[in-house]
Image (cartoon, rainbow, N blue to C red):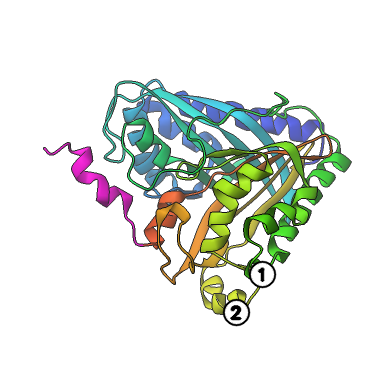
Amino acid sequence: MLPPNSTRAAEKIRIHAALSRLAEAKPGDIFAQLTDMFSPDLQWRSSHPLNEMRGLADVNDKVWQPLKEAFPDMERRDAIFVAGEYEGRTYIAAVGHYCGTFRKNWLTIPATGRPVWIRYGEVYELRDGLIVQANCLWDILDVIRQAGFWPIAPSLGTEGMWPGPFTGDGLVFHETDEIQSAKSLAQTLAMHKTLGDYNDLTGAGRDGLLAMPQKEHWHPKMMWYGPSGIGTTRSLQGFVDYHQLPFRIAFPNRKGGGQWDEIAAEKAKLGGGHYIRIGDGAYSVTGGWPSVFALHKGGGFLGQGPTGKVVTMRVMDFYLHHEGLIRENWIPLDILDVLMQMGVDVFDRMQSHFRRGI
């Protein structure tokens, strides 16, 4: 466990430097960099189609070597870098982009010879100075978009790179106030409770979501940065119109109305729920693998009709708390995995396009 203040700040600086070295390592040096910072029995969890693996050999061979071959000049650009403890576990969490020139095909996505930004949300569990679990939600659908392909329905929000925090202070390498950190997390969890308590079946629709108690927690100039396939929204109105209402039509009353009982078996099998809940100064982070369980009862979300299936979601939420409210929310979410559960295999669908008919 990390003690607060200066020691925790020093550990964040150390891990940040190690992650940057890994991103810029030459192929022959990658395994040594992995060994330097990760446990030999590392649990790796990443976006589809990389998914889950165990041990450094697989992470080297299946993740980092192909990535560096595709983007040989890659570098890491963090916008948020925070840390904290939850249930006795120590975590470091980051949002940012890997930047590199797309020189060779990656995951069958055709190389462009142009710069590409791989958006990431990453959460690392530390034990005795080594990372024992890596949760890496890389926005691979956004890489497909940057390569010139769009395999699903149009996004309702705005596609593009995520900016860093409005306050310009997302790299939290300094000592933070424990009281402020606790308040940041408490505000996030209070907002989450309003979402869980809300009854989607009243017929209030858009007006109900705009008026319900979530509005007490969001800043008037809130920004909600969704993954590729959903996109970015601004203000509560934008959030409701371009994400929240379509989502809640598709997955109504996830935490009420009997859904919890209907999906109990799936939850018991997968575990899930939040593995991280931390506050670090003006920032807070939650995430689960998966953290969302829901019955897909309605149409429209991601352009798909209702399947009646239990759908799970690998998701993280990073929050900036500003002027007493939630000003910005970055949401890494594995959209490709969600679509797989809805019966849409994006990579299978796109192979003839990726081959360009060859």
Q: Of the residues under marks 2 and 1, which one precedes in the sequence? A: 1
Front-most of residues 99 and 259: 259
Residue positioned 75% across, 57% down in the render: 212
**Residue 351 forms part of the magenta stretch:** yes
Residue positioned 33% across, 35% down in the render: 66
Q: Amino acid at mark 1?
A: Thr
Determine the residue located farthest toward the left in the rendered image.
Answer: 358
Front-most of residues 291 and 37: 291
Residue positioned 67% across, 29% down in the render: 165
User: Can you give x and y, in whole percent of width and height, for residue 266 in the image?
Assistant: 51, 73
Q: Which mark is residue 202?
A: 1
**Which residue is the site of mark 2?**
261
SS state under label 2: helix
Q: Quarter-wise, where is residue 84 in the image?
A: top right
User: Can you give x and y, in whole percent of width and height, for residue 128 in the image?
Assistant: 66, 44
SS state under label 1: helix
Q: CA distance from mark 2 to mark 1?
A: 20 Å
Can residue 128 be seen in the rendering of this structure?
A: no
User: Is 339 above or below relative to 72?
Assistant: below
